[in-house]
Amino acid sequence: MTEYSGTGDPKRTLELLWGVQERPRRGPKPRLTAEEIVRTAITLADAAGLDALSMRRIADELGVSPMSIYTYVPGKAELIDVMTDRAFGELTPPEDATWRARLEHIARDNWALFHRHPWLLQITTVRPPMGPNLLGKYEYELRAVDGLGLTDLEMDSVVALVTGFAESAARVSVNAAEAERRSGMSDEQWWESVSPVLDALVDEADYPLGTRVGTAAGQEYNAAVAPGRAFEFGLARVLDGIEVLINSR
């Protein structure tokens, strides 16, 4: 199931993202904090995805009533925005000397993040959470291509190209792993079951290029796709294209 960021109450979401505290209340010290709830939610989402995430399940993990969760977080939409911002806070700014190495670091860091938190791929962030981590991420990504002669719009587009590529490539990789998990069958086992039937049904002469290239790729990858290899190849080509743009300046 796809979730959409930015669908909760904007004011409450921003308060949670930026850690705005309510006025101290009289009485016993609160049992929880919003950050504890967010960390628990991330752990649950890492294990079972966003589909399995609910306020009741979070409450069960924390040993409190579901209604008490709403004291700190108004709803799932706001919670997902904060989870997203906190997860992206794991990324690290590049410290490399060259623009190419900086962008490569950004792409690899994002690729790794999506594998640690696959639920991030279930979220459409056309309205990204305006939290400190995502704003900080955008700032250092822009610094990676600052001073290269690009216009502001080109800088924004280069950053979007690199991070978008990393997300797209990670999606294929995560989906491939999930297919294997759900089917209980490795890619090699799948090919072994498909090949005899395919050979009986398809005349290779009708698909000469597909047969030649597909056979070479299949023998090399031992699978229908090789997400890691595709990421490496694609990243190099993306950076090559950016280099042409920069050199044109």
Image (cartoon, rainbow, N blue to C red):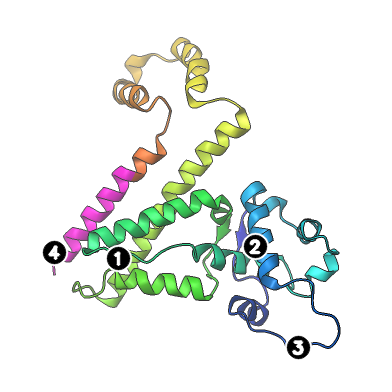
Tell me, yes or no, whether the highlighted magenta stretch contains residue 238: yes
Q: Residue at x 63, y 81 (%)?
A: 15
Q: Determine which residue is flagged by label 3.
A: 24
Task: Name the disc covering residue 53, or none.
Answer: none
Pointer 2 residue: 39
Cα gap from disc 1 to disc 2, whole angstroms? 28 Å
The reply to whether the C-beta atoms of the residues labelled 3 and 1 are less than 8 Å apart is: no
Query: Does residue 216 appear to the left or right of 199 in the view shown?
Result: left
Which numbered tag is attached to residue 247? 4
Earlier sequence position, callout 1 versus callout 2:
2
Q: Quadrant of the C terminus?
A: bottom left
The structure residue drawn at horizontal position 51% and vertical position 20%, both measured from the top left corner, is 189
**Horizontal and vertical percent position of residue 87:** 54, 62
Query: Circle 3 — which element?
Result: loop
- Percent x, y of residue 147: 21, 75
Badge 4 marks a residue whose secondary structure is helix
Give the secondary structure at mark 1.
loop
Q: Amino acid at mark 2?
A: Arg
* Mark closest to the chain's N terminus, 3 or 4: 3
Determine whether 180 is above or below 143 in the image: above
Q: Which residues are magenta?
A: 232-249
Whole-number angstrom distance, CA of label 1 to CA of label 4: 22 Å
On the image, the x and y values in percent for residue 218 come to: 37, 24
10 Å crowding of disc 2: few (<14), some (14-19), many (20+): some
Which of marks 4 and 1 precedes in the sequence?
Answer: 1
Question: What is the three-letter code of the residue carrying label 3?
Answer: Pro
How would you rate the neighbour count of disc 4 (Cα within 10 Å): few for under 14, some for 14-19, many for 20 or more? few
Residue underneath mark 1? 95
Q: Give the left or right position of residue 225, taking residue 6 as reference.
A: left
- Tell me residue 173's x, y (percent): 47, 42
* Residue at 68% from the left image edge and 59% from the top image edge: 41
Instruction: Name the residue at the left extreme.
Output: 248
